[in-house]
C-alpha cells in the first residue's frame, strides 16, 4: 500500500495540494497534474525537493498518460463561483472530457479512481439537510450551470465506468471547505471575509445574509477523502461539516477571529445562489467512521496566519 503511486489532478489547487501532502506523509509516490488555471505554484513550492513528488503541467481535457498508477484522485476543476463564471467553457470541459480522460487512465491501469464532486449537485435544495439519495434542484441553463452540470455529468461518467467497465470508482460530494491555500482572491466567502476583515474593509454580504452554508476545515475533509478512497463504496458520499451558519453569522465569526472592526456592506445576491446548504453525513459516519472535528472558530484561527501572509500579495 505505502509504495503505491498515486495521480492527483488539480494538484496545485487548494484541496489538491493538501491531498498531495497527506498522501506523501503516508509514504506514497505522487504525480501531480495541473494547468494552473485557478491553482498556483506557491501551493506546491514546498514539494519541489520531495523525491516522491513529480509535477506535470498539463490541461487534463487533453489526453495524457504519466505511466502506471495505482490510484487517481480527480480534483481538477475551477471551484469558486467567481472562477467558474470566468472560465465557463473550461469548467464544462474539465468536468466532461477531463473526467473521461482520468477514467480512461484508471481503466487502462486497473487503478482506483476518486472524483471530487460537489454539494452543487443538489442545486438550490428543497430537501434539507441534503442526503445522498436526493436528486437535486439544479437550473441547467443558469450562471452556475457550467459548474453544476459538468459535475453532474462527471458523476454519470464515473458511474458508467464503474457499471460498464468495472472500474473501482468513488464519488465524494464535497460541501464548502476552507483553510490555508485558498486563493485569497478567488471570491469565495471565507477568502473574501478574511482578507476584507484583515484590511479593515467592509465585509461584503450578498443578499440579506440569511442564506446558509456549512463550513468544513480542510484537514477534516482530506481525512474523509482518504477513508473513502480505501472503502468499497461506489455511490456518492457527502463529506462536510454539518454545523450550519448564516452568512451573517459567518461574517461575525470572521470579525471575532481577526479582531476586525470592519463594517458590513450588503450587496446584490447573485442569481441562483443556493438559499441553504447542510450535509447529512450519516452515511460517511456509518461507512467511514468519519466526522469533522474542527469547529469554524478553530478553523478560522488555523487559517489566520496564511491569510495575513497572502494579504500583502493581493
Ligand atoms: P481550486 O481552484 O483551488 O483547485 C482546482 C485545481 O484544478 C486548480 O489548481 C486548477 O488550476 C486545476 N485545474 C482546473 N482545470 C484544470 C485542467 N483542465 N487541467 C488541469 N488542472 C486543472 O479548487 P479546490 O477548492 O481545491 O477544489 C478542488 C476540487 O474539489 C474541485 O473539483 C472542486 O469542484 C471540488 N470541490 C471543492 C469544494 C470546496 O469547498 N473547496 C467544494 C465542492 C467541491
Ligand atoms: N458570499 C457573500 N459575500 C462574499 C462572497 C460570498 O455573501 O463576499 C455568499 C454567497 O452569496 C453565498 C455564500 O456566501 O451565499 C457562499 O459563497 P461561496 O462563493 O463561498 O460558495 P458557494 O457555496 O456559493 O458555492
Image (spheres, rainbow, N blue to C red):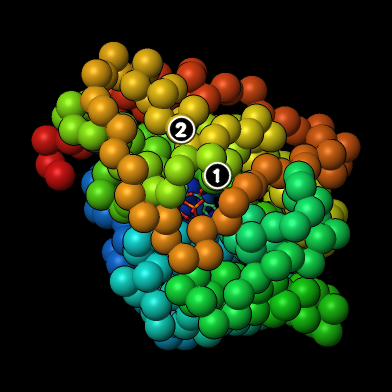
What residue is shown with label 1? 211
At label 2, counting other C-alpha atoms closer than 10 Å, the crowd grade (few under 14, some 14-19, many 20 or more) is some
Q: Is residue 78 above or below residue 191?
A: below
Q: Is mark 2 within 8 Å of ligand 2?
A: no
Q: Quadrant of residue 291?
A: top right
Q: Write down the quadrant of residue 10 in the picture.
A: bottom left
**Front residue of this view, candidates 93 and 206:** 206
Q: Image check: 81 left or right of 44?
A: right
Percent coordinates x, y for residue 229 in the rendering: 70, 51
Question: N-terminal of the two: label 1 or label 2?
Answer: 1
How far is mark 1 from mark 2, CA to CA? 8 Å
The answer, for residue 50, to whether it is visible in the render is no
Left or right of 244 on screen, residue 88: left
Q: Is the residue marked 1 within 8 Å of ligand 2, measured from its CB?
A: yes
Where disc 2 sits, the SS reads helix
Q: Element under label 1? A: loop
Query: Residue 238, relative to residue 141: is it above or below?
Result: above
Q: Residue at x 63, y 34 (%)?
A: 244
On screen, residue 143 above or below 43:
below
**Quadrant location of the C terminus in the rendered image:** top left
Where residue 88 appears, x then y in whole percent? 39, 77
In the picture of the structure, the residue carrying the numbered disc 2 is: 248
Q: Residue at position x 45%, y 43% from top?
A: 208
Residue that appears at 33% across and 49% down: 267
- 155 to 201, vertically: above or below: below
Amino acid at each position: 500500500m505505502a509504495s503505491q503511486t498515486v495521480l492527483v489532478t488539480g494538484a496545485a489547487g487548494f484541496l489538491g495540494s493538501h491531498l498531495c501532502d497527506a498522501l506523501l506523509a503516508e509514504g506514497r509516490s505522487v504525480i501531480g497534474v495541473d494547468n494552473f488555471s485557478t491553482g498556483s505554484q506557491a501551493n506546491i513550492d514546498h514539494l519541489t525537493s520531495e523525491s516522491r513528488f513529480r509535477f506535470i503541467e498539463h490541461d487534463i481535457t487533453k489526453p495524457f498518460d504519466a505511466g502506471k498508477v495505482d490510484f487517481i484522485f480527480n480534483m481538477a476543476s475551477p471551484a469558486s463561483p467567481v472562477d467558474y463564471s470566468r472560465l465557463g467553457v473550461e469548467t464544462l470541459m474539465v468536468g466532461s472530457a477531463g473526467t473521461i480522460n482520468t477514467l480512461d487512465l484508471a481503466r487502462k491501469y486497473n487503478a482506483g479512481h476518486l472524483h471530487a464532486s460537489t454539494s452543487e449537485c443538489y442545486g438550490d435544495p428543497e430537501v434539507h439537510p441534503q442526503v445522498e439519495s436526493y436528486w437535486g434542484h439544479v437550473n441547467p441553463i443558469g450562471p452556475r450551470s457550467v459548474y453544476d452540470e459538468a459535475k453532474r455529468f462527471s458523476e454519470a461518467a464515473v458511474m458508467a465506468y464503474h457499471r460498464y467497465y468495472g472500474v473501482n470508482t468513488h464519488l465524494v460530494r464535497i460541501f464548502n471547505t476552507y483553510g490555508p491555500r485558498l486563493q485569497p482572491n478567488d471570491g469565495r466567502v471565507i477568502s473574501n471575509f478574511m482578507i476584507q476583515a484583515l484590511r479593515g474593509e467592509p465585509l461584503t454580504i450578498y443578499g440579506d445574509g440569511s442564506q446558509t452554508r456549512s463550513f468544513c476545515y480542510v484537514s477534516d475533509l482530506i481525512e474523509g477523502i482518504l477513508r473513502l478512497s480505501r472503502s468499497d463504496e461506489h455511490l456518492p458520499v457527502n463529506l462536510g461539516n454539518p454545523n450550519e451558519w448564516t452568512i451573517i453569522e459567518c461574517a461575525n465569526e470572521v470579525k471575532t477571529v481577526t479582531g476586525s472592526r470592519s463594517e458590513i456592506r450588503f450587496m446584490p445576491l447573485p442569481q441562483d445562489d443556493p438559499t441553504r446548504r447542510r450535509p447529512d453525513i450519516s452515511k460517511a459516519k456509518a461507512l467511514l467512521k468519519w466526522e469533522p472535528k474542527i469547529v469554524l472558530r478553530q478553523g478560522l484561527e488555523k487559517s489566520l496566519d496564511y491569510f495575513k501572509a497572502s494579504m500583502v500579495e493581493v
